[in-house]
Image (cartoon, rainbow, N blue to C red):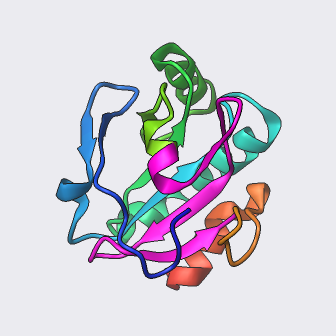
C-alpha cells in the first residue's frame, strides 16, 4: 500500500459518466481519491453522503473528489443518482486501480481507504488501511478531510 509522502501511481480510467480521468491531468492540484467496498451499502452510503453534504467546500477550494469501487457502470450510476452524489465514481471493474493504490483485498473486494493527494502527486494523508493515520469515520469523513487541509 502507498505510504504518506509517496508519489501516487500513474493511472487512467473513466468515470461512471464516461469522462476520462488520469493522474497526469490531475498534477498541479490537490485531490481526494477514496476507495470504498461496494455501492449502496450502509457504510458506503454514509461516507458518500458525508462528502456530498460538504461538497461545496471542496468545489470552493478547487479540490476534485473521486470515489472508486469495483462496481459496474450501472451500479455506480444507480448509486450516484439515488443519493444525488455530485462527484464522479471511477470505474475499476478489474480492480486495477485498487491494486495500484494498495486498496485491493483478496476475494475481489476493495478496502475503505482515502488518499489525500497534493499538487506534486504525492500522498499527503491516508485514512483507513494499514498505513492510515486513523480509520475512516464514514458519517464524518468529509470533516476529517476538511480539518486536515484546514479548508
Question: Foreground residue, 101 or 27?
Answer: 101
Residue 69, quarter of the rendered image: top right
Q: Which of 36 and 141 is in front in this view?
A: 36
Where's residue 112, x and y in %?
Answer: 68, 51
- Is residue 66 visible in the rendered structure shown here? no
Q: Which stretch did the figure color magenta?
A: 99-128
Q: Specify the farthest residue to the front.
A: 106
Residue at horizontal 75 percent and vertical 55 percent from the top = 138
Q: For the N terminus, which image quadrant?
A: bottom right
Q: Residue at 41% across / 76% down in the picture? A: 6
The residue at 65%/30% (across/down) is 108
Residue furthest to the bottom = 150
Q: Is residue 92 or residue 75 the one in the foreground?
A: 92
Q: Is residue 122 visible?
A: yes
Residue 121 on the magenta segment = yes
Looking at the picture, how far across and down is residue 147, in whole percent?
A: 61, 81
Residue 61 in the image: state x and y as whole percent: 36, 71
Q: Nearer the viewer, residue 6 or 21?
A: 6
**Count of numbered circles in the view:** 0
Amino acid at each position: 500500500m502507498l505510504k504518506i509522502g509517496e508519489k501516487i501511481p500513474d493511472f487512467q480510467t473513466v468515470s461512471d459518466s464516461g469522462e476520462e480521468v488520469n493522474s497526469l491531468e490531475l498534477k498541479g492540484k490537490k485531490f481526494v481519491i477514496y476507495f470504498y467496498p461496494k455501492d449502496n451499502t450502509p457504510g458506503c452510503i454514509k461516507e458518500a453522503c458525508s462528502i456530498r453534504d460538504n461538497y461545496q467546500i471542496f468545489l470552493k477550494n478547487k479540490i476534485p473528489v473521486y470515489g472508486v469501487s469495483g462496481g459496474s457502470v450501472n451500479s455506480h450510476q444507480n448509486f450516484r443518482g439515488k443519493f444525488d452524489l455530485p462527484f464522479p465514481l471511477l470505474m475499476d471493474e478489474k480492480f486495477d486501480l485498487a491494486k495500484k493504490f494498495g486498496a485491493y483485498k483478496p476475494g475481489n473486494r476493495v478496502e475503505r481507504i482515502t488518499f489525500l493527494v497534493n499538487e506534486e502527486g504525492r500522498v499527503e494523508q491516508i485514512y483507513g488501511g494499514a498505513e492510515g493515520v486513523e480509520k475512516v469515520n464514514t458519517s464524518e469523513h468529509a470533516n476529517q478531510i476538511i480539518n486536515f487541509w484546514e479548508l
